[in-house]
Image (cartoon, helix red, strand yellow):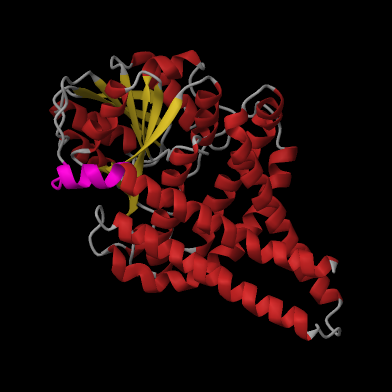
């Protein structure tokens, strides 16, 4: 009986959460998104006024990509903005390239600092930013020309908005891993953010493309330099301070993603560790200081951790009891739940891709590659979560979080 309950929990958790994300994402689309797509088919928008925006670009060893990134920023369809690039002690020619570009384009200012990590770079730029709105993108990303105006509109329409997270789109699609991630960014990132926006609290902004109200960031003391994922941390602290976070699908940003298993594992391990660190640091405060809006987030996160360890435990148990033959009822339960789980997973992908195809042409053709997601990515997720939680538990507190150059899939680009 205990084994049957465990099996049921393992198979029902992804199925139930898929229904939650699908329901919230579809509601978001028909309640808000469809109207904007209908009224702005060209993705262009006019604002009543254009406050100064400071675009902050932290860079570490981005010599091969930084000119392309800065060029995309210089082409923004927004009349009032500055660009601040922070060279965080790069070991390549990033600093020299930035200085060369700055000579030609006075809109760009360059800050050079010793290698201290992304959060420290953003804090440094925060001190020198002149704009009331801050937009942060990574040094290897390409910002859509209309992105700034769509993010800024949230700050003009509602005073309680502290941050806006954009819509990252995968550029590297030449391998199976890249093609699966194209669907994943719609299903696991885009659809979930839409649903969380409906349910009231976002787990995290997308650090690769996000905007902040400067006064809100200053109120919480800037970015935390000791957290592995500064974007998750700042998301929680802003919302705990009473600020809201919005999701803006029109604010597209084209990003490079890992296309090797090793690079993907390192990236997802960092994400998982960052999520664990934030929940460990702020979870008790949310539970016992009346932060009711965070309870669903905490519950879902704890359920995902429990699910990952349950799968590991079940696999270990099966290895130890390999000679035992499961009953016919257990086999039937396994088959029915497995089919249901995979069906709902693929339905989640299909719904999210049908929504996001408005922003990413040719997205639907990648749907067939998503059939590999339940097998490959769930195994990766289980592995990273089970390793990340103890890493977060035993990591030294107040240790500076510096970054390493990730696998960006560049070797697969033509």
**Location of residue 328 with respect to 379 vertically, above or below:** below
Residue 15 spot, x, y in % from top left: 57, 62
Q: Is residue 37 magenta?
A: yes
Asked whether 243 or 177 is in front, the reply is 243
**Location of residue 1 with respect to 273 vertically, above or below:** below
Q: Residue at x 80, y 75 (%)?
A: 318
Q: Residue at x 63, y 59 (%)?
A: 13
Residue 112 spot, x, y in % from top left: 37, 24
Residue 178 makes an appearance in the image? no
Asked whether 231 or 24 is in front, the reply is 24
Residue 27 makes an appearance in the image? yes
Residue 344 spot, x, y in % from top left: 51, 66
* Image label count: 0
Give the extent of the magenta segment.
32-43
- Tell me: 1 left or right of 272: right
Main secondary structure type of the part rendered in magenta: helix
Residue 278 spot, x, y in % from top left: 62, 34
Q: Residue at x 41, y 50 (%)?
A: 25
Determine the image quadrant of residue 244. Answer: top left
**Location of residue 271 with respect to 348 vertically, above or below:** above
Q: The C terminus lies in which quarter of the figure?
A: bottom left
Asked whether 75 or 120 is in front, the reply is 75
Asked whether 37 or 311 is in front, the reply is 37
- Tell me: 368 left or right of 333: left
- Tell me: 56 left or right of 391: left
Q: The N terminus lies in which quarter of the figure?
A: bottom right
Q: Is residue 232 magenta?
A: no
């Amino acid at each position: 009986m205990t084994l049957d309950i465990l099996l049921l929990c393992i198979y029902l958790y992804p199925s139930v959460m898929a229904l939650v994300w699908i329901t919230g994402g579809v509601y978001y689309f028909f309640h808000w998104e469809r109207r904007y797509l209908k009224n702005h088919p060209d993705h262009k928008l006019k604002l009543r006024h254009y406050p100064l925006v400071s675009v902050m670009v932290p860079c570490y060893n981005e010599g091969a990509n930084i000119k392309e990134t800065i060029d995309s920023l210089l082409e923004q369809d927004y009349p009032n903005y500055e660009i601040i690039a922070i060279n965080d002690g790069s070991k390549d020619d990033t600093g020299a390239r930035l200085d060369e570009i700055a000579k030609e384009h006075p809109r760009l200012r360059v800050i050079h600092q010793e290698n201290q990590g992304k959060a420290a770079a953003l804090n440094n730029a925060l001190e020198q930013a002149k704009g009331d709105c801050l937009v942060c993108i990574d040094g290897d990303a390409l910002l859509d020309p209309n992105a700034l105006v769509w993010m800024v509109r949230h700050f003009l329409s509602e005073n309680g908005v502290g941050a806006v997270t954009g819509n990252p789109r995968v550029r590297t699609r030449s391998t199976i891993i890249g093609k699966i991630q194209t669907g994943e960014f719609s299903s696991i990132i885009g659809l979930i953010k839409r649903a969380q926006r409906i349910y009231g609290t976002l787990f995290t902004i997308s650090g690769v493309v996000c905007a902040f109200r400067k006064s809100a960031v200053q109120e919480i003391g800037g970015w935390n330099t000791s957290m592995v994922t500064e974007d998750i941390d700042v998301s929680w602290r802003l919302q705990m301070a009473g600020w809201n976070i919005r999701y803006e699908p029109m604010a597209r940003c084209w990003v490079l993603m890992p296309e090797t298993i090793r690079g993907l594992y390192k990236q997802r391990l960092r994400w998982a560790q960052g999520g664990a660190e934030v929940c460990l640091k702020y979870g008790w405060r949310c539970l016992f200081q009346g932060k009711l809006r965070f309870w669903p987030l905490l519950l879902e996160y704890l359920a995902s951790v429990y699910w990952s360890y349950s799968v590991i435990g079940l696999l270990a148990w099966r290895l130890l009891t390999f000679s035992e033959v499961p009953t016919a009822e257990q086999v039937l339960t396994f088959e029915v739940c497995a089919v249901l789980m995979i069906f709902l997973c693929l339905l989640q992908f299909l719904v999210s891709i049908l929504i996001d195809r408005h922003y990413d042409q040719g997205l639907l053709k990648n749907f067939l590659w998503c059939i590999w997601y339940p097998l490959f990515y769930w195994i990766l997720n289980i592995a990273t979560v089970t390793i990340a939680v103890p890493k977060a538990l035993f990591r030294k507190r107040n240790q500076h979080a510096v970054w390493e150059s990730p696998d960006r899939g560049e070797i697969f680009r033509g």
